[in-house]
Image (tube, rainbow, N blue to C red):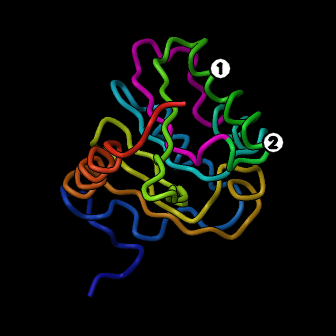
Amino acid sequence: MQRAGSARQHTGRPSDPIGPVGRKSTGRPGQLLKGAHHGLVIFSPYWRLGGVQSLLSTAGRASCADLNVRVFTPAAARMKAEDREALSFFIDKMRSSGALVQRLSPRPTNGMAPFVHAKLIIADSLRAYVGSAYFTNSGLDYSLEAGVMAEGEIANAFALWVNAVETPCGAW
């Protein structure tokens, strides 16, 4: 049995089984944003300006030239105004730094649209973060949250899942 603090760094295993817990958990997601070269996928149901600013600040990235960003969120009609505003702020910042950004949400099937509740970031299909934190100031900086950083096969499995989930989603 492997102890939490002795995670191995090789393909297919979590690189940090006990992700950020407690204050300032923006570091792990921010690292993915900073290190993405080609593609970035983000799933989040809630967005707040303070959390987005914290995430962008932690990433410390001036240019996102040619970075393909896909953001999966609930449909605009299902989001609070402050979530839509914070998401728009994030997208505007990414686009102004050169990123190509697409917003996606599940399309209704039989009158029902699934609610995006996952909190997931994938960079280049090589590294991923999945956790409990919302992209809000309290979720990223002040709440007790847990998350896992993954590399290799696990991150790629998340990327394959995203490709399957994207089919029934539409841009907005």
Q: Is residue 79 left or right of residue 106?
A: right
> Residue 167: x, y in percent?
31, 42
Which residue occupies the foreground of this view, 3 or 156?
A: 156
Between the C-alphas of marks 1 and 2, the distance is: 15 Å
> Residue 147: x, y in percent?
50, 64
* Label 1 sits on residue: 92
Q: Is residue 72 magenta?
A: yes
> Which numbered disc flags the more N-terminal residue, 1 or 2?
2
- Region rendered in magenta: 57-76
* Label 2 sits on residue: 82
Q: At label 2, which amino acid type do we have?
A: Glu
> Residue 53: x, y in percent?
73, 35
Which residue occupies the foreground of this view, 49 or 79?
A: 79
Q: Residue at x 32, y 69 (%)?
A: 7
Quarter the C terminus occupies: top right
Q: Is residue 45 magenta?
A: no
Quarter the N terminus occupies: bottom left
Quadrant assignment, res 146: bottom right
Which residue occupies the foreground of this view, 150 or 117?
A: 117
Q: Residue at x 44, y 33 (%)?
A: 70
Q: What element carries label 1?
A: helix
Q: At label 1, which amino acid type do we have?
A: Asp
Q: Which residue is drawn at 62% across and 60% down?
A: 133
Q: Nearer the viewer, mark 1 or mark 2?
A: 2
Q: Which residue is drawn at 78% across and 38% down?
A: 49
What residue occupies the far front of the structure in this picture? 110
Residue 2 tag number: none
Q: In this view, does 28 lie to the left or right of 48?
A: left
Q: Is mark 2 on a helix, strand or loop?
A: helix
